[in-house]
């Protein structure tokens, strides 16, 4: 049984699991190290060991060894290679134990021992740093393989690549830790039994595989940017990991000629641009006490101009390619907002035109709803209400609280108080995010 199993479904190095003789400062150091580095360490171990479960178990045992040894020896100057090296020896020990009962494990154990001996321990540890980002890229493509169910791709990526705990992921996506853990177990079994190779796909496979990766990163960022439930508007660990993965893909940056007629090469830049521009507003989206602040009321001096500039530069590169898709168009919409001095100065005609293009290439009720709100800003609330009602009549957004909230705002702006209050109450009944609930409750109080 791994240390994580002994400590429950929380973080492996949660302070509640720390031995009492570990100094508090060292405990925090190890917990931070686990959160920041476990994804990279695991990715390298999967490459070295060729087995996701074995790699995860060995990593946990390496951190357990750190808990025992570092209070006496001190934290190594470069702890990641130390942990990888220790984990690899732990894996060999595990295989030795298994080989007593399963002869098929003996060959793998001998292979790892020979590989380790021939490379030489010191040289091998030094070389581990050179390939860590390539290892993460391989692990991302493995976790986002099209043969896995979409919900399993998200869960597995957050767990194995980003290092989030089962509890954190379950909370973010409104499911139970048990259900989430079952998804991860099934996904791992699929990888092992298919088998799904641990590798960056070939140029021929890349369009399909890269699209799945972009979708997962987009879903992770969306959940972090506007949490589905909980006490906070955002989840910084999710937006941060999504942006970090986006940067990794931009560095990988497949050339357009490799992707043929596909637009995914530019879409890698488009997605990172979209995430950076949205994240630039983080500091202005809530008050010091946590209340939600709408875009129209945000203090734009708090927006992160460096992130906006980086996002716009990526957007220009993507648009220049003339082979872009939905992520780039969404980034372009976000850029129009980011570059306007106020809501009144926003070029709503351009935003509606961009939504027109987006609806053509990615038709969805949510895109149509956003377009309807932009139309309201361009043509007035009556026009916006007509379009929102048309979207709601389709039925797919009947339980989507933002649709009812947008409808309520149109009624409010038109002075139709009773209808506005009814729509706000409907939205309130559908949302589980506390700041959003407080905002809607305040709007309802204003209607009385």
Image (tube, rainbow, N blue to C red):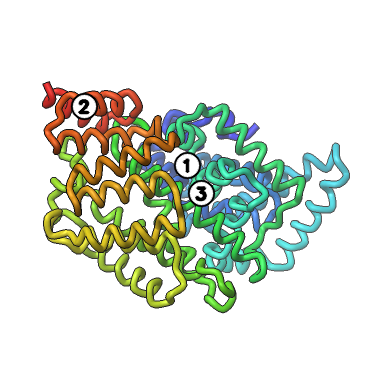
Along the viewing direction, whichever of 441 and 203 lies nearer the viewer: 441
Q: Are marks 2 and 3 in contact (CB under 8 Å)?
A: no
Residue 162: x, y in percent?
Answer: 48, 48
Q: Are marks 1 and 2 in contact (CB under 8 Å)?
A: no
Along the viewing direction, whichever of 135 and 49 lies nearer the viewer: 135
- State the residue position of label 3: 38
Residue 134: x, y in percent?
Answer: 56, 65
Q: Earlier in the sequence, mark 2 or mark 3?
A: 3
Instruction: Please rate how many residues cluster around mark 3, counting C-alpha atoms within 10 Å: few if below 14, some from 14 to 19, many from 20.
Output: many
Along the viewing direction, whichever of 250 and 446 lies nearer the viewer: 446
Residue 70 versus residue 405 in the image, above or below: below
Residue at point 84% right, 53% down? 107
> Which is in the foreground here, disc 3 or disc 1?
1
- State the residue position of label 1: 164
> Which is in the foreground here, disc 1 or disc 2?
2
In the image: residue 85, left or right of residue 295: right
Residue at point 80% right, 53% down? 108
Q: Are marks 3 and 1 in contact (CB under 8 Å)?
A: no
Quadrant of image for the N terminus? top right
Q: CA distance from mark 1 to mark 2?
A: 42 Å
Along the viewing direction, whichever of 122 and 128 lies nearer the viewer: 128
Residue 419, label in figure? 2
Q: Earlier in the sequence, mark 1 or mark 2?
A: 1
**SS for tag 1?**
loop
Residue 314: x, y in percent?
Answer: 36, 70
Residue 91: x, y in percent?
Answer: 69, 47
């Amino acid at each position: 049984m791994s240390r994580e199993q002994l400590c429950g479904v929380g973080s492996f190095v949660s302070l509640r699991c720390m031995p009492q003789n570990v100094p508090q400062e060292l405990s925090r150091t190890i917990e931070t190290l686990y959160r920041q580095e476990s994804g990279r360490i695991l990715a390298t171990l999967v490459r070295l060991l060729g087995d996701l479960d074995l790699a995860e178990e060995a990593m946990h045992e390496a951190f357990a060894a750190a808990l025992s040894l570092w209070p006496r020896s001190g934290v190594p100057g470069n702890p990641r290679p130390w942990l990888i090296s220790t984990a690899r020896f732990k894996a060999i020990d595990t295989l030795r134990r298994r080989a007593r009962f399963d002869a098929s494990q003996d060959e793998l154990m001998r292979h790892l021992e020979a590989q380790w001996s021939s490379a030489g321990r010191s040289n091998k540890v030094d070389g581990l740093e050179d390939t860590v980002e390539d290892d993460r890229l391989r692990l991302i493509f493995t976790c986002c393989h099209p043969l896995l169910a979409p919900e399993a791709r998200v869960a597995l990526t957050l767990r194995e690549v980003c290092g989030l705990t089962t509890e954190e992921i379950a909370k973010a996506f409104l499911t139970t830790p048990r259900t989430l853990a079952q998804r991860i177990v099934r996904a791992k079994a699929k990888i092992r039994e298919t088998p799904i190779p641990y590798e960056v796909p070939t140029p021929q496979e890349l369009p399909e595989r890269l699209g799945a990766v972009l979708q997962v990163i987009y879903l992770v960022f969306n959940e972090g940017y506007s949490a589905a439930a909980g006490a906070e508007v955002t989840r910084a660990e999710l937006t941060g990991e999504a942006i970090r993965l986006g940067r990794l893909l931009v560095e990988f940056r497949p050339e357009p000629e490799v992707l043929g007629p596909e637009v995914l090469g530019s879409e890698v830049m488009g997605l990172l641009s979209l995430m950076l521009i949205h994240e630039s507003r983080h500091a202005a989206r809530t008050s010091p006490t946590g209340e939600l602040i709408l875009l129209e009321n945000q203090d734009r001096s708090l927006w992160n101009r460096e992130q906006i500039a980086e996002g716009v530069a990526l957007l220009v590169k993507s648009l220049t390619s003339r082979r872009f898709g939905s992520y780039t168009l969404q980034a372009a919409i976000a850029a129009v907002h980011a570059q306007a001095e106020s809501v009144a100065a926003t070029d709503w005609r351009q935003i509606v035109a961009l939504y027109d293009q987006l609806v053509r290439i990615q038709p969805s009720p949510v895109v149509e709803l956003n377009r309807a709100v932009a139309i309201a800003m361009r043509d007035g609330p009556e026009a916006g209400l007509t379009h929102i009602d048309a979207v709601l009549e389709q039925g797919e957004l009947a339980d989507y609280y933002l649709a009812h909230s947008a409808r309520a705002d149109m009624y409010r702006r038109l002075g139709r108080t009773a209808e506005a209050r009814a729509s706000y109450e409907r939205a309130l009944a559908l949302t589980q995010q506390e700041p959003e609930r407080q905002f809607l409750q305040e709007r309802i109080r204003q209607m009385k």
